[in-house]
Image (tube, rainbow, N blue to C red):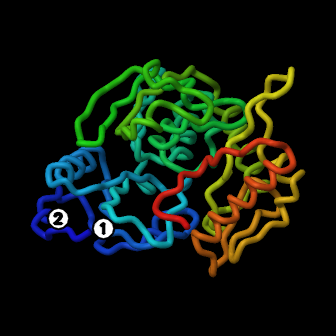
Amino acid sequence: MTIDQRIIEKLPAEARVELNACLRNYTTFKLGGPCPAVVMCPDGDTLTQAAQLFSEHRLPYIVIGQGSNLLVSDEGLDCIVLRYCSEEQPRVQQEGSRIRVSGNTLLDDLARSAIEFGLGDISYCSGIPGTVGGAIAGNAGAFGQQIGDVVESVRLMNSDGAIEEVRAETLDFKYRSSVLKQSGAIVLDAVLKLKPADIPPMMKERERIMELRRTKHPDWKQNPCAGSVFRNVEPSSAADRRQAAGWFLEEAGAKEFRVGGACLFDKHANIIITEPDASATDVFHLTEKMIAAVQKKFGFKLVREIKVLGPFS
């Protein structure tokens, strides 16, 4: 796909454009082939104007955040990529017991800001990569808690750039899911309803969680990865608790699996890390091998938590 330069020139002045971009620079796996352009959108207005412009000219596009749960094909994508992620300027405002936060704010920045405001407790979001918008769409969480529990309303952009504000109850939050995963609407910003809490205990809990992540999870900047590859397994016992996908993978012997430059993190059987010579195809085939191993031993198929984009053989 080629883009008329005259269309690029109509983008908002705040947009920064990289033509013929390599998507490995925009995912935490550090994998992915080329695309016609990546348009960096620092705020919601820039994002919606860009989306409206490309829709008007019938140019296909997708929106990504930090790229922390994406596996992009080595062949790349034949569409424009709008990047809605602010890694340096979190946009978080306190409004009494509520927080208004932009969808492009990093989730960890939100967790830290809430503590500083004396509002909580969403310290469980500490250290989770990705943006607030992506977290809300996927109902991210940890330690039995999820962000959908504190969302009050969201302002959304649909595929043609139109905007609407909706209440949380319309989003049908479920485990690692919401209607946004199906609709593809993008969270421009959100209002979270929190409760006042003492700062020192929350800060202590944040430090505990960050240390726990350091000991059990890889640092994606040092060991490229995309966090948990598969969703945890729905309850199958009287305990009525989801069972860790990593347990089933370890029991199935997946921890020793390797395909090319992709292998399992030595401390977590549900996290794939990539070496410098890895390809997205390596990762994809490793996930297929993991699915097959669990299905053979336990009789069910794991469901990917990461999103696969582009063609894979």
Q: Which residue is drawn at the image coordinates 57% and 21% (left, top)? A: 196
31 left or right of 235 in image:
left
* 84, above or below 201, in the image: below
- Badge 1: few (under 14), some or many (20 or more) residues near its Cα, within 10 Å? many
Q: Which residue is drawn at the image coordinates 50% and 23% (left, top)? A: 172
* 234, above or below 45, in the image: above
Residue 35 location, x and y as percent?
A: 36, 69
- Disc 2, SS: helix
Label for residue 174?
none
Badge 2 vs badge 1, beta-carbon distance below 8 Å: yes
- Badge 2: few (under 14), some or many (20 or more) residues near its Cα, within 10 Å? some
204 left or right of 36 in image:
right
Residue 71 location, x and y as percent?
A: 54, 60
Q: Where, quadrant-wise, is the C terminus in this rendering?
A: bottom right
Q: Where, quadrant-wise, is the N terminus in this rendering?
A: bottom left
Of 217 and 92, nearer the camera is 217
Q: Which residue is drawn at the image coordinates 10% and 67% (left, top)? A: 6
Number of callouts in the render?
Answer: 2
Quarter location, residue 95:
top left
Quarter location, residue 258:
bottom right
155 left or right of 76 in image:
left
Residue 156 location, x and y as percent?
A: 33, 34
Residue 15 location, x and y as percent?
A: 24, 59
Callout 2 amino acid? Ile
Give the alpha-carbon distance from disc 2 to disc 1, as whole Å.
Answer: 10 Å
The residue most toward the bottom is: 277
- Disc 1, SS: strand
Give the residue number, with chain letter if any, for mark 1.
37
Callout 1 amino acid? Ala
Label 2 or label 1, whichever comes before in sequence order: 2
Give the residue number, with chain letter if any, for mark 2.
8
249 left or right of 185 in image:
right
